Amino acid sequence: MKPVDTPMDNDELIRRDLSVLWHPCTQMKDHETLPPIPVRRAAGAYLEDLDGNRYLDAVSSWWVNLFGHCNPHINAALREQLDTLEHVLLAGFTHRPVVELSERLVRIAPPGLSRCFYADNGSSAIEVAIKMSFHYWRNLGQSGKTRFLNLSNSYHGETLGALAVGDVALYKDTYRALLLEPVTVPSPDCFARAPGRSWEEHTREMFRHMEAALERHAASLCAVIIEPLVQCAGHMRMYHPVYLELLRAACDRYGVHLIADEIAVGFGRTGTMFACEQAGIRPDFLCLSKGLTGGYLPLSVVLTTDTVYEAFYDDHRSLRAFLHSHSYTGNPLGCRAALATLDLFERTPVLEDNRRRAARMARATADLADHPHVAEVRQTGMILAIEMVRDKARREPYRWQERRGLAVYRHGLRRGVLLRPLGDVVYFMPPYIVTDAEIDLMAEVAREGIDLATHDP
């Protein structure tokens, strides 16, 4: 085997990759015609391959990167931590980074979220939240509460518990026989609103389905789980914050927990630090990951209330403890990266600057609303989505087998922009250091790609 510093080109690394690797979320046969991109290094908003080609990371490497690749402040914090403590078990031990991170998360989270439970990734955080909710009701003697309520088109991860409480058929159908069966109500997705209806009107109207389900099933429900404001993996569908306000009140009324999955939308993506803030509500469980470490290391956390915490607090012989665990829970390197990420929010006006960037994204893509094969350009904060359709008037989608979005992806790579559409939805979720010129480039390349993908000879 060659030393790691031996010069190598794209073709060689691709060949070696395809002989040993199985990539995530990929039909590997596709790589016969569309090879993986070997990344040698990254800086700022750009990735660079072994042949020196650069790619603008318009999707923040699966929505994790907040402040650019190889951010100097996060790099320095990790170097210091690496020379101090790389890892220690969190059962019976503690360390400064995890304590300080927990204190800071409690300070910035919606008031009342006072306890932090750590895991390794977003799916694991969802597992923690649903197990904790179920176990809470069991500890209170309400053993009839065993089910969860979700929204259609929702996505919460790939582990079996997280998959069970989602509703994207592409990921779920194959494994349905292995999964818990949730109660599912129609999403308030505003793409489906009637002509002339505002986002708020449509969202309020759709809440009747949630109200009816809670009234019918409350006695058997542990919790409602929801992605606040944006159903990201569900083709970036969006809805009005009033739904969260109505849902919080209904959950209180019917005695059901509220789990907010802010794994993708937390840390400024929707325009506020947490999406729940836009409705002025506090969930019973707040799940965070992805941007938590600025895109550096896998780490997740579930924040919950003292009420939930106290339901598990008892003598050992009561067998009420929450025994869920991961080997790398509260890893010091991950916690230190997260602390450095929060430093950047505190030291610079990130959310204010993002409002300007979001407005630039809107202006740069405004003309696409008139494209004959674009049904909608929608936006929530730093998330912008462009939905391609066969028939604009009827909003008739393309057949999924045509893979129109893949054509946009291929064009983006040729032009040096990483766009990874969700089906036929082209979206931007860039790091918060993106410049006006880079936003304009993203829009230009997306426009070109959509023209190519929707042109039928």
Image (cartoon, rainbow, N blue to C red):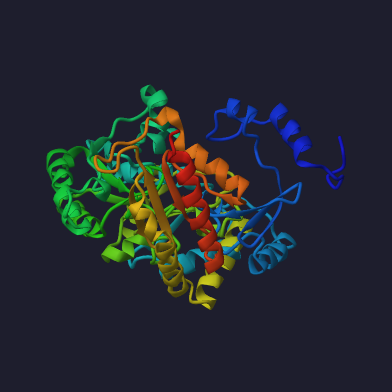
Side of 15 where 402 appears, left or right: left
Above or below: residue 369 compared with residue 176: below
Of 87 and 50, nearer the camera is: 50
Q: Residue at x 58, y 52 (%)?
A: 417
Percent x, y for residue 373? 36, 44
Percent x, y for residue 192? 23, 45
Q: Residue at x 59, y 67 (%)?
A: 340
Percent x, y for residue 11? 76, 36
Above or below: residue 1 compared with residue 368: above
Of 236 and 197, nearer the camera is: 197
Q: Which residue occupies the extreme top position in the image? A: 177
- The quadrant of the picture occupied by the N terminus is top right
Q: Residue at x 37, y 46 (%)?
A: 387
Residue 46 in view of the camera: yes
Above or below: residue 444 compared with residue 188: below
- The quadrant of the picture occupied by the C terminus is top left
Residue 431 in view of the camera: no
